[in-house]
Image: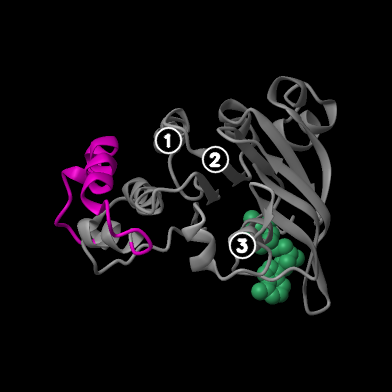
Amino acid sequence: MLEVHNLTVRYGAVEALRNVSVKVPDSGFVAILGANGAGKSTLLRTISGLVRPASGMVTLRGKSITGLKPEAIVRLGLSHVPEGRGIFPDLTVAENLTVGAYVHRSDHASRYASVLANFPALARRERQPGYTLSGGEQQMLAIGRALMSGPSILTADELSLGLAPVVVKQVFETLSEARRAGVTVLVVEQNARLALRFADYLYVLKQGRVVLEGVRDELGRSAELVDAYLGA
Ligand code: ATP
């Protein structure tokens, strides 16, 4: 279980998160919804050790990981797919995947084979540089690279950004696949319909606070959510 307890994060005078608490159960698929600037990326960046909170705590399996370096957090089994993918455009698909395995080199070959088996589009482009891939393929590569460290939890920031709906669906199906294989998934998303389709528990962030949360079926019927995100 990954837990965020009363997290407050500030960038100078800007309070990006205030007293945010989130629970991600093992093998769950949790989504954080919210508009631009709601604090979604800040939440994931704090969980993965890229940002230090002003107060509050992040725990993994009951132990605090707050303030640990990102590499230490990856070693504990939490892998992050950043917004904008962050793949290396001049490295090949194979090289990008190998970079993802840096914390666990031992069973690199079997992980590599399993990622390629799950992403046939990447397998066909193994020797191509990252910049030659389509947006959807780059997103798959970013997810594949995160899976190369053999995580128990995968966090992903706005995977749908800039992708066509059909490609977004494929990308999210990949996450569902990872989840079926036992990986816990936490995503942040602006696209509420998409999040409601794939996640089983959702939180809504607004101006740095959790304003709504619930299981998919309940939240999908919430008048507040429908008004704010899904239209009349
Ligand atoms: P988006 O979908 O646009 O990325 P978000 O929900 O992920 O939005 P954050 O990027 O977490 O939101 O930003 C939350 C708030 O913190 C915003 O007001 C933003 O302007 C501010 N912020 C984010 N990063 C920084 C930074 N490095 N320095 C100063 N302010 C920041």
Picture coordinates of residue 18, whole percent (x, y): 84, 59
Picture coordinates of residue 119, whole percent (x, y): 28, 39
Disc 3 residue: CB within 8 Å of ligand 1: yes
For mark 1, what is the residue?
178
Per the image, label 2 sits on a secondary structure element best described as strand
In the picture, measured across the screen, residue 30 lies left or right of residue 122, that is: right
User: Which of pointers 1 and 3 lies earlier in the amino acid sequence?
Assistant: 3
User: Which of pointers 2 and 1 lies earlier in the amino acid sequence?
Assistant: 1
Q: Which quarter shows the C terminus?
A: top right
Q: Is residue 111 above or below residue 199?
A: below
Badge 3 crowding class, 10 Å Cα cut-off, few under 14, some 14 to 19, many 20 or more, is many
For mark 3, what is the residue?
45
Task: Look at the numbered discs 1 and 3 and tell me whether their residues touch, using CB distance below 8 Å.
Answer: no
Distance from disc 1 to disc 3, alpha carbons, whole Å, reads 21 Å
Q: Residue at x 45, y 37 (%)?
A: 175
Q: Is residue 217 above or below residue 88?
A: above
In the picture, measured across the screen, residue 104 lies left or right of residue 73, that is: left
Which amino acid, by three-letter code, is at mark 3? Arg
The answer to whether residue 29 is magenta is: no
Distance from disc 3 to disc 2, alpha carbons, whole Å, reads 15 Å
For mark 2, what is the residue?
185
Q: Which residues are magenta?
A: 102-129
Task: Look at the numbered discs 2 and 1 and tell me whether their residues touch, using CB distance below 8 Å.
Answer: yes
